[in-house]
Image (cartoon, rainbow, N blue to C red):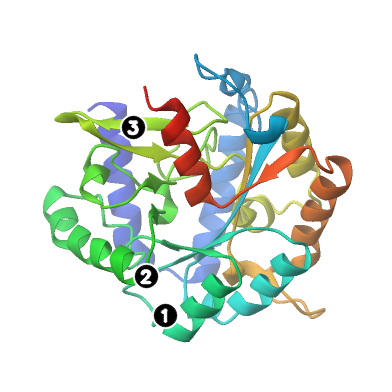
Amino acid sequence: MKSGSMKKYINMAYYFIKPFLSRKVQLFLRRRYAILKRCLNKNKWPIDYQAAKKPGNWQGWPDNKQFAFIVTHDVEKLKGYQKVKKLAELDLKYNVKSCFNFVPMLYSVEHDMLNYLKESGFEIGVHGYNHDGKLFSSINIFNSRYPVINKYLNDWGSVGFYSPSTLRNMDWLHQIKMEYDSSTFDTDPFEPQPDGVKTIFPFIVKYEKDNSKSYVEIPYTLAQDHTMFNILKEKSIDIWKMKVDWIAENGGMVHVRTHPDYINFSDNYVSCEYSVNLYMELLEYIQSKYRDMYWNVLPKQLSSFWKTNYND
């Protein structure tokens, strides 16, 4: 059996038994596995040096900015949804443009919430279907679900898709009526589909059956917060800082993805959460060290820029 097929069946098996495992058991298994993965991938995580290669027709970022800065927030469950306004208020405090991604078939997303975010300058993305890990497990399941995803893209006025757990089929994604996808990463061996796209820049994905159809792929480039603080149990943002410096040096895209589900806004310890101070420290680090040197932009604006300038 080919390694790709083996990974697919392992992922299917994991998501089949996942509902029967306690959160504590899930984290234990992932942490033990992460120790091995981190050792095996020490030469390409957190930095894969091949990912610094610029596009062939590279012309730079707008206004001669040194690098791009993208912030996205995946709202996985109702627990995270209840923290959205706190996180939005924090981004507003730091004058950070960001995108909130909601799961359409898992919890109710109120129109008042969507209106508040849009009026405040945020973007709304669609985060999969119901976060059960099965969207790409078979073409029949995908075909039954993508029309619903398209409906929510339209209803929410969204143009971006974010696949839960970064499970993906880049060709199938052309059936989703989006302008951009963000279901990949430059390097992240801890994800269920660990194959990185090896670039810290966006890129165009054309449809194999019709090259006139395409979307922009916007990979995330910093380790996800859940991986950093819950799986690897890091106590500082040193890995984030090191990666930011490397991306800035190479003129790429700093794309951080957080999950309000795991952010603790209080001083009281809560299992499986990390202090909001770590996220704030990242924003302060970028804003202080790289003041006026980066382009903080919404993903939809980045997608439009990329498709206009690099769609060859």
Q: Nearer the viewer, residue 246 or 267?
A: 246
Secondary structure under tag 2 reads: helix
Reading the chain from its start, which is encountered first: label 1 or label 3?
1
Residue bearing the label numbered 1:
109
- Residue that appears at 58% across and 63% down: 259
How many other residues sit within 10 Å of disc 3, few (<14), some (14-19) or many (≥20)?
some
Which residue type carries mark 3? Val
Q: Nearer the viewer, residue 210 or 61?
A: 61
Q: CA distance from mark 2 to mark 1?
A: 10 Å
Q: Which residue is mark 2?
A: 156
Question: Which of pointers 2 and 1 lies earlier in the amino acid sequence?
Answer: 1
Element type at mark 3: strand
For label 1, the crowd category at 10 Å Cα-Cα, with few meaning under 14, some 14 to 19 and many 20 or more, is some
User: Which quarter of the figure is the C terminus placed in?
Assistant: top left
Residue closest to the eye, 51 or 308: 308
Please identify the quarter of the rendering in which residue 143 is found: bottom left
Q: Is residue 153 left or right of residue 48?
A: left
**Given contact means CB atoms under 8 Å apart, are the residues at marks 1 and 3 in contact?**
no
* Amino acid at pointer 1: Val
Alpha carbon separation for disc pair 2 and 3: 24 Å
Point 74% across, 61% down: residue: 95
- Locate residue 101, reporting x and y percent: 47, 63
Q: CA distance from mark 1 to mark 3?
A: 30 Å
305 above or below 43?
below
In the image, residue 193 lies at what x, y percent? 40, 40
Q: Secondary structure at mark 1?
A: loop
Q: How many marks?
A: 3
